[in-house]
Amino acid sequence: MIYSISLTFILILFFVIGISFGFNRAIGMIPVLFIIFLLVAFLGWFAVNFFWLILLIIFINYLRNRNQPKRTRRTYYYRYDGTNANNFEDFFRQAGRSYNGQSQGGYENNPFGYAEDKSRYYEILGVSKTAGKDEIKRAYRELVKQHHPDKFSNASDSEKEYHENKLKEINEAYEKLSKDFS
């Protein structure tokens, strides 16, 4: 019985493929259809012979999980721990919302996407917003000389860490601002 049902299913599938895509392609699909026939026949035989066992397993799982609430996927949101205010402000600036009642420069209606506020980078390098490429490069090199970690090799760990972080900020600022001129 199972074999006749699966054979009927495969024949219907063969004719659908033949009518839709041509019988040459349907003949080319015979090996695939044979594999599908074997799978349907085996799974059908398995489902008929072990129906009560499958039903018992489903019932046991139902009894075991009926008192537990359904699990949903968790959504992880950006967490602010108070240590890096710049990242928190950047998060809201990109989202186009306000932080502490002030607009952070997000552009909700901008059809071209997020426009980054680079005023912070100009402040880090100590140049005006109208500075040219050469002036930005000069300020960058001067600040790198002042805060380079090799210059503070004998300093305390906290001072080393301060200058390393300052150098990272300087590099980031120069990278962001130099993109405008390339």
Image: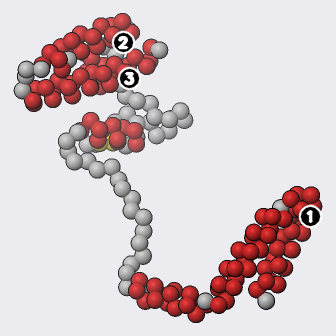
Question: Going 55% across and 90% down the picture, which residue do you hit?
Answer: 53
| Amino acid type, mark 3 | Lys
Q: Is residue 139 visible?
A: no
Q: Which mark is residue 19?
A: 1
Q: Secondary structure at mark 1?
A: helix
| Amino acid type, mark 2 | Thr
Question: Going 88% across and 62% down the picture, which residue do you hit?
Answer: 26
Residue 144 at x, y = what percent?
Answer: 24, 15
| Amino acid type, mark 1 | Ile
Disc 2 to disc 3, how far (Cα)?
Answer: 15 Å
Q: Is residue 145 visible?
A: yes
| 76 to the left or right of 1 | left
Disc 1 or disc 2, which is closer to the eye? 1
Q: Which mark is residue 178?
A: none
Q: Which residue is mark 2?
A: 130
In the foreground, 27 or 79 = 27
In the foreground, 158 or 134 = 158
Q: Secondary structure at mark 3?
A: helix
Q: Which residue is mark 3?
A: 176
In the foreground, 152 or 118 = 152
Question: Going 26% across and 43% down the picture, which residue do you hit?
Answer: 100
| 56 to the left or right of 151 | right
In the foreground, 122 or 101 = 122
Residue 62 at x, y = what percent?
Answer: 46, 86
Label 2: how many Cα within 10 Å (few below 14, some 14–19, many 20+):
few
Question: Going 9% across and 29% down the picture, which residue do you hit?
Answer: 157
